[in-house]
Amino acid sequence: MRRLLALGLLALLAIVPFTATAAEVKSDELGFSYEVPDDWKVMTKKDISAYPLALGPTEGDFTANINVVKEDFGGTIDAYVEANMVTLRKSFKNLKEVDSSKFVTKSGLEGRRVITEHDTFQKDLRQCFYFFKAAKGDTWIVVTTSCLTSVGEKLQPTFDGILKTFSNGTGSSGGGAGGAM
């Protein structure tokens, strides 16, 4: 799945220089947007990600970041999340699932949030995956936050606050987060 590609790309962010700043991250193609704190950087670098990346505080040699991927999947949100977790469990033998719960944005868009911790590229990472249905078709938007495990609990409220501003462009719940999605 694209998840492994995204994880590999996120590791590159620790060494990628960044220049532009902005308060909003958006994609016209997928119709999503979310807001980041003013001291975060936003960059578009198509060789790393098809969608804009948000870069937060640096701890050690790793920059906390937010990355977005899209995937087509015709099933429910529960089936989609589980399919992703199966892939992650196979890829990371030391994967620890910290939390899995419903997540609702300020606009009422319902999704799922899964928090994991694992050793990747000799780094202990905490990654949080937010799963949302795109406004059209059988497309899912997965927003992944990554940081070192050592600062994960401290940054989680920031990541959750950022993702509370997430919109898929519908201005509504996007069909709900239940099994019927």
Image (cartoon, rainbow, N blue to C red):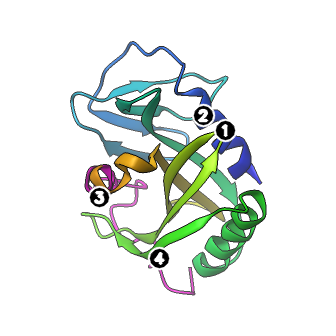
Q: Which residue type does callout 2 highlight?
A: Ala
Q: Which residue type does callout 3 highlight?
A: Lys
Q: Which mark is residue 175?
A: 4
Residue at the image point whose x is 70% and y is 62% from the top: 88
At mark 2, the secondary structure is helix
Q: What main secondary structure does the magenta stretch of the protein show?
A: loop
Span highlighted in magenta in the image: 155-181
What residue is pinned by disc 1?
121
> Quadrant location of the C terminus?
bottom right
Estimate how packed mark 3 is, as few (under 14), some (14 to 19) or many (20 or more) residues with alpha carbons within 10 Å.
Answer: some
Q: Which mark is residue 11?
A: 2
Residue 130: x and y in percent read 47, 61
Q: Which residue type does callout 4 highlight?
A: Gly
Q: Residue 88 carries which label?
A: none
Looking at marks 4 and 1 on the same chain, the residue that comes earlier in the sequence is marked by: 1
Residue at the image point whose x is 49% and y is 32% from the top: 52
Residue 56 sits in quarter: top left
Estimate how packed mark 2 is, as few (under 14), some (14 to 19) or many (20 or more) residues with alpha carbons within 10 Å.
Answer: some
Tell whether position 89 is magenta. Answer: no
Q: Which residue lies furthest to the left in this view?
A: 38
